[in-house]
Image: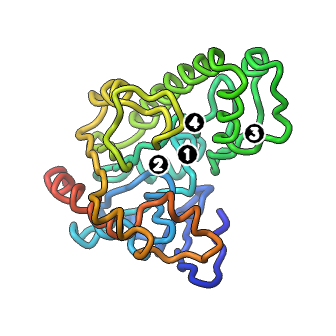
């Protein structure tokens, strides 16, 4: 993970835990005492935010909260990194931010193990479904799926169904490796939709039936949708170079992180 510095750039104090492959947001926490582990993507990492919700939860709980969020990470980020998964497994409680079904290796394509938004290669199954598509110039999963949807909607629907089932299988595998007390966190602008079949809204392709299938495997599902006030503050309570304004607009600001922490703290206090 490369985190460039520059004008209006935050210092994320990147740190490594043991033999884990990835760098995580620091400063490093003490793993010799009871701690909470938080897994997720860029919102959990807290890109462009001085104090992301794991740090705010830590202050409220009075115990270490280890931020294992990764930029553009999904379940594969952890399932391909046994050392990071072991850190999460040893936590008193684990919080898993729900990420999209597109950012996972699956029967149709493979993604990068640590930057799960990166498309690596199409499988023979995908090439058979889309013989008309040239995959050579496609480098990101979102771009790939946009191309597939434009090319053949019927074949695209088959891919989406496969992505959703693959996400469910991988999430069950991830949750089984975490401590018995574990939470799912829905962090998005709107509540989970009844049915999801497109890239938008985020997290892509995740809907109520998928989440319902995971409820027996978790202690709680926390739905954290930002208030109108928090969304209005978003352009003003983040720190980023002007060249990254478009990326920042897609991520939660400090006020949203504060609201997420407020939702998590009472549940975690009951579980600790």
> Do callouts 2 and 1 mark residues in contact (Cβ within 8 Å)?
yes
Identify the element where label 2 is drawn: helix
Q: Is 194 on the left or on the right of 116, as rendered?
A: left
Q: Nearer the viewer, residue 147 or 160?
A: 147
Write down the residue under mark 2: 86
Structural distance between the alpha carbons of marks 1 and 4: 22 Å
- Vertical position of residue 13 compared to residue 100: above or below: below
- Give me the residue at 38% from left, 42% from top: 178
Identify the element where label 1 is drawn: helix
Structural distance between the alpha carbons of marks 2 and 3: 26 Å
Structural distance between the alpha carbons of marks 2 and 1: 6 Å
Q: Is 264 on the left or on the right of 17, as rendered?
A: left
**Which is in the foreground here, disc 4 or disc 3?**
4
* Residue 117 appears anywhere in the view: yes
Sequence-first disc among 4 and 3: 4
Structural distance between the alpha carbons of marks 4 and 2: 25 Å
Sequence-first disc among 2 and 3: 2
**Which is in the foreground here, disc 1 or disc 3?**
3
On the rendered image, what quadrant is the N terminus found in? Answer: bottom right
Write down the residue under mark 4: 102
Sequence-first disc among 1 and 3: 1
* Residue 57 appears anywhere in the view: no
Sequence-first disc among 4 and 2: 2
Q: Is 265 on the left or on the right of 148, as rendered?
A: left
- Vertical position of residue 83 compared to residue 45: above or below: above
Write down the residue under mark 1: 82
Identify the element where label 4 is drawn: loop
Sequence-first disc among 1 and 4: 1
On the image, which quarter does residue 206 sit in? top left
- Give me the residue at 65% from left, 23% from top: 107
Residue 202 point in image, percent of width and height: 46, 43
Q: Residues within 10 Å of mark 3 (few under 14, many from 20)?
A: some
């Amino acid at each position: 993970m490369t985190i460039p510095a520059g004008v209006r750039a935050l210092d994320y104090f990147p740190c490594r835990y043991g033999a884990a492959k990835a760098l995580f947001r620091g400063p490093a926490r003490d793993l010799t005492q009871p701690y909470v582990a938080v897994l997720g993507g860029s919102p959990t990492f807290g890109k462009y935010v001085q104090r992301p919700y794991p740090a705010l939860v830590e202050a409220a709980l009075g115990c270490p909260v280890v931020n294992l969020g990764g930029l553009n990470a999904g379940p594969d980020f952890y399932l391909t990194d046994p050392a990071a998964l072991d850190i999460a497994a040893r936590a008193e409680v684990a919080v898993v931010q729900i990420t999209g079904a597109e950012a996972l290796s699956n029967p149709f394509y493979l993604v990068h193990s640590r930057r799960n938004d990166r498309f690596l290669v199409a499988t023979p199954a995908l090439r058979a479904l889309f013989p008309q598509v040239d995959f050579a110039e496609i480098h990101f999963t979102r771009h790939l799926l946009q191309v597939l949807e434009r090319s053949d909607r019927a074949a695209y629907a088959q891919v989406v169904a496969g992505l959703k089932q693959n996400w469910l299988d991988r999430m069950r595998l991830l949750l089984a490796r975490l401590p018995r007390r574990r939470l799912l966190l829905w962090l998005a602008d709107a509540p989970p939709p009844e049915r999801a079949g497109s890239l938008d809204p985020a997290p892509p392709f995740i809907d109520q039936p998928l989440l319902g299938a995971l409820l027996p495997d978790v202690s709680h599902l926390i739905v954290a949708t930002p208030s109108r006030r928090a969304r209005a503050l978003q352009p003003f309570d983040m720190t980023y170079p002007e060249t990254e304004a478009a990326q920042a607009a897609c991520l939660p600001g400090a006020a949203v992180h504060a609201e997420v922490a407020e939702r998590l703290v009472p549940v975690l206090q009951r579980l600790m």
